[in-house]
Image: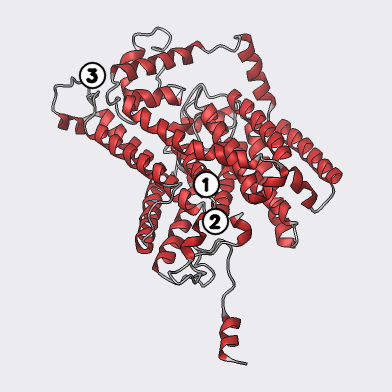
Amino acid sequence: MSLRHVLVSLRIPKVDQGVCLGAGWGIANLHNIFRYISLTLLVICICLLPGSNMKLPGTTHVMIIWLTCAAFGCWFLARVSEWRGPGAHEKSVWALAAAVCAFGWLVTCFPSAMVERLTGAILGLDRSPWVAFGTMDQAASVQGMVSVSNALMLLVMALDFGVERSCRIAMALAVTVAGFITAAAGLCIHSSADLMALWKVPHVPSSVFGLFWYHGNTASFLNLSWPLGVWLCLKLLRNGLRSFKQQIMLSLLVVAVMVQIIGVCVNVSKMGHLLLAAEIFLLVGGGLMAWKPDLSMLPFGRWRFAALIGIGVVLLLAGAWLSGAGVGLERWNVFAQRRFDDPARRHALVMALKIGLDHGATGTGPGTFEWVSVHYTALDPLLKVGHWRHAHNDYAEFFAEWGWPGAGFFLMLLIFPLRRWLTTLRQVFAPASRQHEMSFHRRAGLICLSVAVISVLIHALVDFPLQIDAIRHLFAVVLGIGLALTHSTASRSTSGRSASGVRHPELVPWSFKEMK
């Protein structure tokens, strides 16, 4: 046997999308080492998100901050050592993320509404800016900006790793694990006595809180996570379940998705129920339109598949009812007697808009709504009874805290990538004759991720999910993966060719099938 045959026989098999794992040659150089460490830390960070609530004993809040910073540092070193700048799908996100961070930290250092620590009075604008470092809202603003900065780091990293198939599967699996932990914890701890002892809140209803202090946040977190579990299940079904390991994996994923859906059903969040129904409707409708040509690839017949779906629905309904979903129905009845009106939230929305208009140039500062709102709730007889930490409308609260410039940055951060996202979705729902241009993995992912992102954006109209660290970070990861799927890996195929036209496998790990 020649030396060439010996070397070929010892060559490590290629790993699909293997840039993050060494491109099939093992961890061969410095930038691959940094990318592997960064992805590992990112996955661990996602799995720890359910425990990030600072009220929990043994909270993972500080750990997540350091893990995110360490992952971002390794990712940055990998990009520098690789000498690779932002791609076409990354330029606008990088620029707007940098603008949001720069503006937010500037307002944090020089707030426009400084709340004195002892008296709670709002200081005048003619006071020295350095007084802000001893005020309540400056401390809250620093904490808020740390959270926002961490979320933007996760967005940038997920946008880069999401281009590679194995990396986005690892992140989607981590999101599913985080959702399962949240749902399981909520189903185990959802009695009024347990919750009042844990959160010291006397008006807690009998509901699933998961690991968050407000039931709507749990519903939003679960509605964001379970569609990614569905995506992974569809991928396994599409592969045909050739091995016993794949069948076990599919079973575990199905259980995880069902537990998360049951958690939303048992939860008393009315908006969570509505969005769950809307997500299921969109996934079924979009799936029938986009995946109809692929139904013939299932490892069993259509009627058997329909029977399995029916059995799953029956198990879901039975599990939800036995877990206490009747309490959610009772709350719907109470809400219906009020003609589905919530005047307190309407007044809170108006108050947040007024704060934003009063401090429109810079806003009051990230995370300062709780302290500044005290001076506005005293003027409203409907709001002065309670303590409003959030406005129950994320968009109004962002406007109050960030003013016109900050709100504009966040709006552009959604609008600029939205054009690419919508263009790619049109390809997903293209005629069957043209769907071969995009792999089933990407088409399924875009539909599931779109549904997940839309659910949080709608929920933010009546609650404050994007003000909660865990949901904010998870939303950044899911958004980053979705934006990465809008970037065709075929565009990078030419970067793997040297000047002489030789194709280097460590630079082009994608298969031709994924390039489609």
**Residue lying at 40% horizontally and 54% vertically, measured from the top left:** 71
Q: Viewed as shown, does residue 329 lie left or right of 510?
A: right
Residue 411 horizontal/vertical position (percent): 42, 30
As measured in the structure, the alpha-carbon distance from the residue carrying label 3 to the one carrying label 1 is 44 Å
Q: Amino acid at mark 2?
A: Ala
Other-residue count near label 1 (Cα within 10 Å), few / some / many at <14 / 14–19 / ≥20 = many
Residue 168 horizontal/vertical position (percent): 55, 52
To which residue does mark 3 refer?
Answer: 121
Residue 389 makes an appearance in the image: no
As measured in the structure, the alpha-carbon distance from the residue carrying label 1 to the one carrying label 2 is 17 Å
Q: Amino acid at mark 1?
A: Ile
Residue farthest along the front direction in this orientation? 500
Is the C-beta separation of discs 1 and 2 under 8 Å? no
Picture layout, residue 330 above or below residue 133: above
What is the number of the mark on residue 481? 1
- 2 vs 3, front mark: 2
Other-residue count near label 3 (Cα within 10 Å), few / some / many at <14 / 14–19 / ≥20 = some
Q: Secondary structure at mark 2?
A: helix
Picture layout, residue 449 above or below residue 236: above
What is the number of the mark on residue 226? none
Q: Viewed as shown, does residue 488 lie left or right of 231?
A: left
Residue 272 makes an appearance in the image: yes
Quadrant in which the N terminus appears: bottom right
**Residue lying at 44% horizontally and 36% vertically, measured from the top left:** 416
Q: Earlier in the sequence, mark 3 or mark 1?
A: 3
Nearest the viewer among 515 and 196 is 515
Residue 134 horizontal/vertical position (percent): 20, 32
Is the C-beta separation of discs 2 and 3 under 8 Å? no
- 3 vs 1, front mark: 1
What is the number of the mark on residue 490? 2
Residue farthest along the top direction in this orientation? 381
Q: Earlier in the sequence, mark 2 or mark 3?
A: 3
